[in-house]
Image (tube, rainbow, N blue to C red):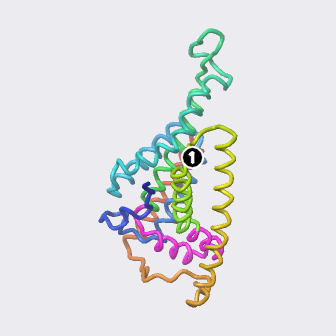
Amino acid sequence: MEYPEIDKYASLDSPMHRFDPRAKIIAFIFLIFSIVLLNDLKLVLIGFLVSILFLIASKLPFHFVIRHLKGVSLFIIPFLVIMPFTVEGNEIFSIYAIKVTYEGLRYGILVALKAFSAVILIFPMVATTKFETTIKALDKLKVPNILVQMLMFTYRYIFVFVDEFQKLLIAMESRGFKLGTSLYALRTIGNALGMLFVRSYERAERVYWAMQSRGYAGSQKTLAEFKMCTKDYVLMVVIIAFAVCLHVVCYAY
């Protein structure tokens, strides 16, 4: 079984990889919120195209991006399909008694473009930096330490727990168990999940005492050192200025 690696392509060389992690997080979060808060379809489309340009500049393989966008599409595309039939407005055409409206189609496209823009911008923001470096950058940006540590441990151990459940499933299948929707199968899966929670608790206890014995004091230790240069400041200011200009144009027209 394969798991997505958030820092699989973090060692590539591109303008986004060389962008200081702290400035990168600030600039892209600002841009994401700017695009999401827009209500003008043309400006959102511009934001979407700019997000594509940042993705191209990051040199991340498109198959890597498309693979991760598939899951998001499962939520966005149904919304895009349903909106034209449910929002009142000017009728474009009708299928039997069901009307397709211009306002519904516009609203569906608007929300879909916002969602895809936000998700696409996350790739150059996160996938171009090693995860532990991103964690340290969040800490330097004064994000509450408890949130930073929770994020670090969640990412680190979620794959461990998936592996643990995979082992339980293999053990059950070796004893003749088959996945299904029967009451017996569901009860067996429930028992396996309960066992997984017990093992998770026991593992958490062992990890806690192991970290205590190694001097863990609630902060992430990495070898990464940050130093902002002129290019980082310029790029951050340009991205934030573009995000602000989108709203200036929106309110002006």
Tell me residue 61's x, y (percent): 33, 52
Q: Nearer the viewer, residue 110 or 182?
A: 182
Q: Main secondary structure of the magenta part?
A: helix
Magenta region = 127-153
Locate residue 117, reporting x and y percent. Answer: 49, 47
Would you place residue 243 above or below residue 16 in this image?
above
Residue at image position (51%, 44%) is 71
SS of the residue under disc 1? loop
Where residue 196 appears, as percent x and y from the top left, is: 63, 61
Residue 130 in picture, x, y percent from top left = 42, 69
Identify the image quadrant of the C terminus: top right
Q: Is residue 50 above or below residue 217?
A: above
225 versus 244 height, above or below = below
| Quadrant in which the N terminus appears | bottom left
Question: Which residue occupies 44% across, 57% down?
Answer: 4
The foreground one among 28 and 69 is 69
Position of 3 with respect to 63 (left or right) is right
Q: Residues within 10 Å of mark 1 (few under 14, many from 20)?
A: some
Of 95 and 164, nearer the camera is 164
The kind of residue tagged 1 is Phe
Q: Does residue 222 belong to the magenta stretch?
A: no
Quadrant of the rendered image containing residue 110: top right
Query: What residue is disc 1 on?
Result: 177
